[in-house]
């Protein structure tokens, strides 16, 4: 009996370790899927067909909701610390990133005479959608690696995700209003509610009514989310590869998009750290957390929204590239911070 009990305890522990290890490889999965989609499009074209992309992201959001309870949001209003930190984090998320996306896309995309107008408009909208999306679930993992505040990271992700139903459509509509890009704010709001707000609420409902089942499933949802997001990104890249958008003739365009996306996320990480650290005088741990939350977006949402409103297929490409870019940048930054902390502890 004693041996049986110990085996029952050890087996889940090993499984959790394997799942955690695989989840940590998130940037590799996304990058691998993007490379596969670009070089062997037929292998991932099935993802871009029908409503699979929307279903995949909604599943990720249900998994996120299953880790949350109503008490998590009540604590925001009851805690003095949260009352000061959460608003700053949300303002960074919905202030720094949308503005950065607008400025970068205006200077690097819209002002480029080497790209056709319909293409520049599509990429411009794609970058704006990335900038106006909420924090990504991978930010919680990167926060853990960085030695920052994981609990705060989860709260910030949850708040920005819930607010996305209002903030994302509103900000996108405002930022494209002065351009020739036409977009329906109502359609965007409905699409955001369907793939974010509804699934998150469903996940929270499941967690409340069946907590044991939700806790068991929560062991697998992080890695499942990694696979689903990687498939979404790979599918979008594959779809654009078949249209010739990623062929040699479009080297200039592809490089512009990649550098624009990288610049957007670098600004997010940098300003997202400086703002709370220098101007709000928050400690390093909190500042790192807000930096990661600001720099890492729910890029898969940008992809789904672009498809939901019937935009040009090119509109989804910045979101697919963004998922790879912010994952790699965030993981590298977290590793640097972790190494820096280890050097301090050894000194």
Image (spheres, helix red, strand yellow):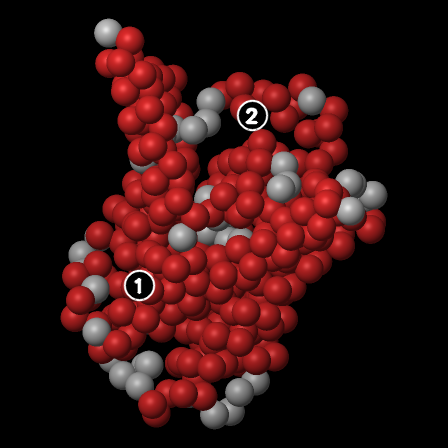
In the depicted structure, whether residue 75 falls above or below residue 177 = above
Residue at 51% across, 91% down? 113
In the picture, the disc for residue 188 is none
Residue at 38% across, 69% down? 317
Decide: marks 2, 1 in contact (CB < 8 A)? Answer: no
Of pointers 2 and 1, the one earlier in the residue sequence: 1
Is residue 190 shown to the viewer in this render?
Answer: no
Residue carrying label 2: 73
In the depicted structure, whether residue 182 falls above or below residue 330 = below
> Is 139 on the left-hand or right-hand side of 309?
right
Residue at 49% across, 81% down? 256
Nearest to the observer: residue 195 or residue 47: 47
| Residue 77 image position (x, y, % from top left) | 66, 23
Is residue 20 shown to the viewer in this render?
Answer: yes
Query: Helix or strand or loop: what does disc 1 sit on?
Result: helix
Query: Helix or strand or loop: what does disc 2 sit on?
Result: helix
Residue at 36% across, 73% down? 314
| Residue 225 image position (x, y, % from top left) | 34, 45
Cα distance in 3D space between marks 2 and 1 = 35 Å
Residue sitting at the far top: 1
Determine crowd level at label 1: few under 14, some 14-19, many 20+ residues with C-alpha closer than 10 A. Answer: many
Quarter occupied by the N terminus = top left
Determine crowd level at label 2: few under 14, some 14-19, many 20+ residues with C-alpha closer than 10 A. Answer: few
> Is 53 on the left-hand or right-hand side of 156?
left
In the depicted structure, whether residue 98 falls above or below residue 256 = above
| Residue 310 image position (x, y, % from top left) | 31, 63
Nearest to the observer: residue 239 or residue 286: 286
Residue carrying label 1: 33
């Amino acid at each position: 009996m004693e041996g049986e009990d110990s085996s029952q305890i050890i087996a889940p522990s090993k499984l959790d370790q394997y799942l955690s290890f695989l989840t940590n490889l998130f940037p590799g999965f996304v990058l691998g899927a993007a490379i596969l989609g670009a070089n062997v499009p037929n292998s991932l074209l099935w993802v871009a067909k029908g409503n699979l992309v929307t279903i995949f992201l909604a599943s990720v959001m249900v998994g996120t909701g299953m880790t949350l309870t109503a008490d998590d949001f009540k604590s925001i209003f009851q805690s003095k610390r949260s009352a000061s930190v959460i608003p700053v984090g949300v303002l960074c998320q919905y202030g720094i990133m949308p503005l950065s996306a607008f400025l970068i896309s205006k200077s690097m995309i819209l002002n480029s005479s080497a790209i056709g107008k319909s293409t520049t408009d599509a990429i411009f909208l794609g970058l704006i959608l990335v900038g106006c999306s909420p924090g990504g679930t991978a930010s919680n993992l990167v926060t853990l690696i960085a030695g920052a505040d994981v609990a705060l990271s989860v709260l910030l992700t949850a708040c920005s995700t819930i607010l996305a139903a209002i903030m994302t459509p509103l900000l996108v509509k405002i930022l494209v209003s002065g351009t020739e890009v036409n977009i329906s704010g109502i359609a965007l709001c409905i699409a955001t509610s369907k793939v974010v707000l509804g699934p998150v609420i469903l996940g929270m409902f499941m967690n409340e009514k069946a907590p044991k089942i939700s806790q068991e499933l929560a062991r697998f949802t992080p890695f499942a989310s990694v696979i689903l997001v990687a498939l979404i990104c790979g599918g979008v890249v594959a779809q654009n590869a078949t249209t010739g958008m990623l062929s040699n003739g479009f080297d200039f365009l592809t490089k512009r998009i990649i550098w624009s996306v990288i610049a957007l996320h670098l600004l997010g990480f940098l300003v997202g750290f400086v703002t709370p650290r220098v101007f709000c005088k928050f400690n390093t741990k909190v500042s790192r957390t807000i930096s990661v939350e600001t720099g890492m977006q729910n890029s898969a949402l940008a992809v789904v929204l672009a498809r939901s409103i019937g935009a040009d297929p090119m509109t989804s490409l910045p979101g697919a590239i963004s998922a790879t870019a912010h994952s790699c940048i965030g993981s590298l930054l977290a590793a640097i911070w972790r190494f820096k902390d280890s050097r301090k502890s050894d000194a």
